[in-house]
Image (cartoon, rainbow, N blue to C red):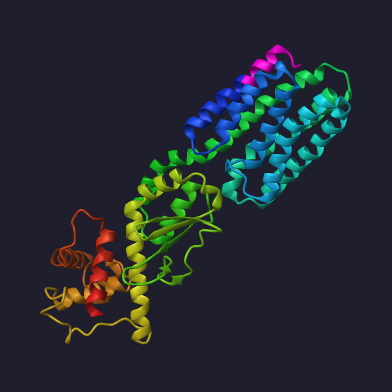
Amino acid sequence: MAPIPVVIAVGAAFLAAGAVAWRRRPENRTGLLLVLSGVSWFLISAGEFFINLFLALIVHQVVVFPYGTARSRLERAIIWSGYALAVGGYILSEIFPTTNDALAALAIPIMVAVLFLVVRRWLKASPAARRALEPIVWVGPPVLIVAIVSVLHDYLDVGTSTAIDWLKLVYVGIPLAFLAGLLRTTVQRAAVGDLVVELADASSPGEVRDALARTLGDPSLELAFRLPNQEGYVDGTGRPVMPPDPDTRGVTVVDDIALVYDESLRENPAAVLSAAAAAGLALDNARLQAELRAQLERRRESEGGQLRVDFVTAPKDHDALAELTTRELEVLTLIAEGRTDRGIAQALYVTPKTVEAHVRSIFRKLDLPADATMENRRVHAVLTFLRSRA
């Protein structure tokens, strides 16, 4: 039996961490498992059954963290082996006391299997997944060593020093590590406010993607856009891409925009949705730019690699561009080629202020909303131009 201060410290740590985790992430079973571990720890004095149950619960938490559920046959086999040994082994040892040593020895290979699973998961984990696993990796080895020593001391009578019972204080690190891992994924929500500020200066789909990737801690994050009247998806450059595979990657679709991310973020969908909501305007602008680039690419292919417009034959009666002057059509064509106001001024041998006046006139005549960003209005203007020419 561990000293009273150790019992109180470990049990309280499990209950407190479990309550916080359960409240912050109710959909994840880690909080519930932590609370059950705390209860079983306080009941250890009632009999060896609760010692076994406590160890089985720890095995369960380590195996399923940070997802909260087992995701492979190996994980399920380790979990069920732990509970079978804890419950079935206790009953068997009560009926046949001579089997106690052999049953206790079976706990060691289970712990070794858990260690193997954690190491393998760490080696295969993406940067986003390692953020959650880091606390467990640091706390796991000393806890595992103390657990093995405890099994040898309590069940196999290896060693007699009471210092082993005080070493169990290291178990306090278990719930703190689990809680830290969960909070490392939820802390991304706090970065949503910074995301809004950062996206204020984003002017391309690539910059929007980079900002979202930094906020969610996933360098592999991708954006895919489904365009109107077109099957499939395109990337930020307007080129077709394969549809996201939900079996191997996490996918969240918001208004025909697919965020494709590391599977470790699947168990925290709220963070993804919060980031997508904060980036709503920027994502819409990125989708428009992707549509613009896709149409530009098709136009270039149909016109031999060069974008051009026939001002003489441009329709004037049934066209959205009917009210534009020839000079304004020239300015809009150069905008479609991706030129800045300064670049347009140099091409037309006019001042930048003259170009700004033409651009404002174009926006007004095309009835583009004044409350939209300049970049957004430019994209809408070019899309109107391309659709009219089509």
Looking at the rendering, the stretch of residues picked out in magenta corresponds to 1-11
Query: Would you place residue 19 above or below residue 293 in this image?
Result: above
Q: Would residue 133 be found to the left or right of residue 254 on screen?
A: right
* Main secondary-structure element of the magenta-colored stretch: helix
Q: Is residue 319 above or below residue 264?
A: below
Q: Position of residue 348 (x, y in %)?
A: 24, 76
Residue at the (16%, 65%) spot, across then down: 357
Viewport quadrant of the N terminus: top right
Q: Is residue 371 left or right of residue 204?
A: left
Q: Is residue 259 above or below residue 63?
A: below
Would residue 376 be counted in the magenta stretch? Answer: no
The quadrant the C terminus occupies is bottom left
Out of 58 and 20, give the one closest to the viewer.
Answer: 58
Q: Is residue 349 visible?
A: no
x and y percentages locating residue 217 in the rendered image:
52, 47
Q: Residue at x 27, y 74 (%)?
A: 334
Residue 288 visible, this orientation: yes
At x 51%, y 31%, the residue is: 22
210 and 151: which is toward the camera = 151
Is 5 covered by the magenta stretch?
yes
Image coordinates for residue 262, horizontal then vertical, percent = 54, 53
